[in-house]
Structures are given as C-alpha cells and as structure tokens.
Amino acid sequence: MSLYELKRNLISFVYPNRCPFCDRVIAAGEFFYTDCAAALDFCENSNKDTFCCVYNEKSKPLLIKAKENADGYAVSACAKLLHDALVRNNVLHKIDIITVIPARKAALKERGYSFPALLARELASLCEKQFSGKMLIFLREIKEQKELSAKEREENLKGALGI
C-alpha cells in the first residue's frame, strides 16, 4: 500500500470518502461512484498528454466543486483523472517533479487558497512524485486569465514567470 493510499484510508475513518458528483459514500480507494464515472466523456485518441475528459455539462460540476469550494473529494477526483491520462498516454515515467504556476496575489487573497496548487499536490501524491509549490515565481504582474483567449493567455504569460 502506498503512502497516498494509506492517507486516504486513514482520512476515510473520520471523513467517509464521497463521490464528488452524487455525494454517495464510496470506498476509500475509489474516486467516483461507478455510474458517475461512466457518465464522463473521454477521448482516447487525444494527442494532449494531460487531456483527461471532455469539458462539458457532465464534467463541469466536478471542476466547479473542486475549484470554487476546494472540495477535497472533487480535487482528488480531478487529480485521479489527470493521473489516469498520464498513465494512458505513457508519459508518467517522464515526470520528475510536479510544480504549479503560482496564484496571482489578488486571486489568492480573494479565494484564500490556490486550486492549481491543491490539484498539483494531490496529483504528485497520486503519481508518487515530488511536489514543489515554490519553483516558479512571477517576475511581473499578469492580467486575470479567465476571460482571455488562448492567444491572449499566451501573450499575458510571456516573460512573466521565472525559476
């Protein structure tokens, strides 16, 4: 049993593991209720290493729950989807360390936590890889990204990060 599995089993004694979709109690080693996981849409032939499922009306509640409420069950489920995509695309062995782009100070102050950091830490535990939350720093302020197009996001981040 891995350290991650041990942690999940111990936590489940106090906080029973729940499906982030339907809120039913599930085994400590599970991440979704079977029917809920089957409802997600997957694209097996994706060229993106971290593609885990189609973002649509089925997956959106999971991400909202994880991102906006820092729901531990939902964060674990998202990390599991990413982990499975890394395994499925045979890239897990190429990863030495998992890090995260730091949260903007304003966003961190407003929310009180960083969803990407929670997700990256959980993913690192699942993958049995080292996590570093302080590897990257902002060299300059950036705009909020959620309303920007892919091209605008790329421009916004150009030269903004350092090691």
Image (spheres, grey):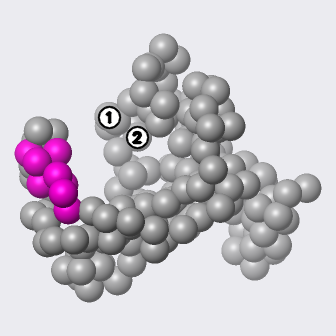
x, y percent for residue 32: 62, 46
Residue 153 falls within the magenta-colored stretch: yes
Which residue: 34% across, 35% down? 55
State the quadrant of the N terminus.
bottom right
Closer to us: 45 or 94: 94
The residue segment tinted magenta is 152-160
Q: Alpha-carbon distance for marks 1 and 2?
A: 5 Å
Q: What type of secondary structure mainly makes up the magenta span? A: helix
Q: Residue furthest top?
A: 45
Residue under label 1, please give it: 56
Residue 122 is left or right of residue 105, and the answer is: right
Local packing at callout 1 (Cα closer than 10 Å; few below 14, some 14-19, many 20+) is few
Residue 119 falls within the magenta-colored stretch: no
The circle on residue 59 is 2
Which residue: 62% across, 38% down? 94
Q: Is mark 1 on a helix, strand or loop?
A: loop
- The amino acid type of the residue labelled 2 equals Ser
Closer to us: 22 or 75: 75
Local packing at callout 2 (Cα closer than 10 Å; few below 14, some 14-19, many 20+) is some
Q: Are marks 1 and 2 in contact (CB under 8 Å)?
A: yes
- Classify 114 as above or below 147: below
Q: In which quarter of the image is residue 152?
A: top left
Which residue: 76% across, 61% down? 4
- The amino acid type of the residue labelled 1 equals Asn
Residue 5 in sight: yes
x, y percent for residue 63: 39, 52
